[in-house]
Image (cartoon, helix red, strand yellow):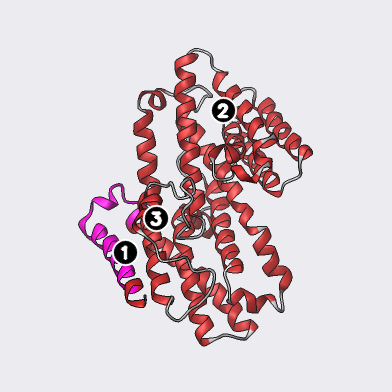
């Protein structure tokens, strides 16, 4: 099964990114605070359950990484000859649109800060804080996040680094033993799901989430191997034992996602269903939408708090408008930055990024 564009994975990503946008709209008021008065179950459900979509993203990321680094369960030549090259390529892909989204969030926050007082606003950034974000070390260094969801980007990068290093290690130690690497992934998945993931103090580190990532890798291998049924049972056993130790909704979502994509891959559905449409279109742009939506969620909340501080219907409409604007902004970010192989090498793009950050600092200085 060649990995290019898989409509089912794209559709799942499309659903997931909209769920995350709605989750942050529910968390960051005041629009959701007004709507909550009449619809507490809906807003509460978005707060608690919509964020679980990140578990689906971790599983899908593991699925795609397995196709790149070890498509047959054994490390590929390209994955072992240039580990640092693969890591840098991943970093550049993640960080280029990430920097634009952070700059956008900083700028919008600086614009609305003088007249919008709310605890959803991040503090004015310092240079050390910006550097920590640029290096994807913000959680590890304990600095305040400048945008919602940026922790996911850092964890995704940590997971990729860990997997690349483990791939290179397996290839060096046992280059001719096909099942060494999958067995190593199973052991680490068990350690993550059964032990580490039960302790929230580890959630800034990749091993805490490695269980979901490894389930995605096993799901991919189950579509390639003659022992696909055994791998599917392994996925089910890893998740079931984890839930027996301690029931956790994130593990339920990760387990269900892994089983769905494994069965869909074995039956040939990944590349055949659904037909390309809105969900698959959203899925292709999901990373950009995920990155950039926070600034526009804050901006829309600020405008609505000023002009429409009351009224359930008008505030519900504001939330839906924020979703549409976030999708539009993410589409532009995808077109001009994420999908461009060397976006930061273009003078106008670099100038726009610098101008956004400089303007934000100027506005924060004037406000101070």
**10 Å neighbourhood of mark 2: few (<14), some, or many (≥20)?**
some
Q: Which residue is mark 2?
A: 224
In magenta, the rendered stretch is 337-363
Residue in front for this viewpoint, 168 or 147: 147
**10 Å neighbourhood of mark 1: few (<14), some, or many (≥20)?**
many
Which label lies toward us, 3 or 1? 3
Which quarter of the picture shows residue 359?
Answer: bottom left
Residue at image location 68% in from the left, 33% down from the top = 235
Q: Secondary structure at mark 3?
A: helix
Which quarter of the picture shows residue 92?
Answer: top left
Q: Between marks 3 and 1, how big is the CA–CA gap? A: 13 Å
Q: Position of residue 217 (x, y in %)?
A: 56, 33
Q: Which residue is mark 3?
A: 129
Q: Position of residue 47 (x, y in %)?
A: 65, 63
Quarter of the image where the C terminus is located: bottom left
Q: Is residue 176 left or right of residue 349?
A: right
Task: Identify whether 215 is placed above or below 123.
Answer: above
Q: Which residue is mark 1?
A: 357
Are the two marked residues, 2 and 1, in contact with CB atoms closer than 8 angstroms? no
Residue at image location 32% in from the left, 76% down from the top = 366
Which label lies toward us, 3 or 2? 3
Can the viewer see residue 271 in this picture? no
Q: Is residue 51 left or right of residue 243?
A: left
Q: Is residue 289 magenta?
A: no
């Amino acid at each position: 099964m060649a990995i290019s564009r898989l409509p089912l994975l794209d559709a799942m990503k499309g659903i997931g990114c909209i769920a995350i946008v709605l989750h942050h709209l529910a968390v960051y008021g005041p629009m959701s605070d007004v709507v909550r008065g009449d619809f507490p179950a809906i807003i509460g459900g978005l707060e608690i359950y919509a964020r679980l979509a990140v578990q689906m993203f971790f599983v899908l990321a593991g699925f795609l990484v397995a196709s790149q680094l070890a498509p047959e369960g054994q490390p590929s030549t390209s994955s072992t000859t240039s580990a640092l090259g693969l890591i840098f390529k991943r970093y550049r892909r993640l960080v280029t649109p990430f920097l634009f989204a952070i700059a956008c969030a900083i700028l919008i926050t600086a614009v609305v800060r003088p007249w919008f007082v709310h605890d959803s606003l991040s503090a004015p950034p310092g240079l050390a804080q910006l550097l920590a974000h640029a290096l994807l070390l913000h959680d590890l260094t304990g600095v305040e996040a400048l945008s919602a969801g940026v922790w996911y980007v850092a964890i995704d990068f940590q997971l990729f680094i860990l997997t690349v290093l483990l791939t290179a290690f397996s290839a060096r130690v046992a280059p001719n033993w096909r099942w060494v690497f999958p067995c190593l992934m199973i052991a680490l998945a068990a350690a993550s799901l059964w032990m580490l993931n039960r302790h929230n103090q580890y959630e800034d580190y990749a091993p805490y989430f490695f269980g979901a990532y490894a389930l995605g890798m096993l799901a991919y291998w189950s579509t390639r191997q003659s022992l696909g049924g055994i791998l599917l049972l392994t996925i089910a056993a890893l998740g079931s034992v984890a839930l027996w130790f301690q029931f956790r909704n994130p593990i339920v979502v990760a387990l269900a996602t892994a089983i769905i994509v494994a069965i869909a891959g074995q039956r040939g559905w990944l590349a055949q269903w659904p037909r390309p449409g809105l969900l698959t279109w959203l899925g292709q742009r999901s990373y950009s939408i995920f990155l950039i939506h926070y600034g526009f969620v804050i901006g829309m909340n600020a405008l609505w708090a000023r002009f429409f501080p009351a009224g359930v219907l008008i505030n519900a409409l504001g939330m839906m408008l924020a979703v549409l604007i976030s999708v539009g902004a993410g589409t532009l970010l995808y077109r001009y930055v994420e999908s461009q192989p060397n976006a930061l090498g273009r003078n106008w793009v670099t100038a726009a990024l610098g101008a956004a950050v400089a303007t934000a600092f100027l506005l924060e200085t004037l406000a101070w």
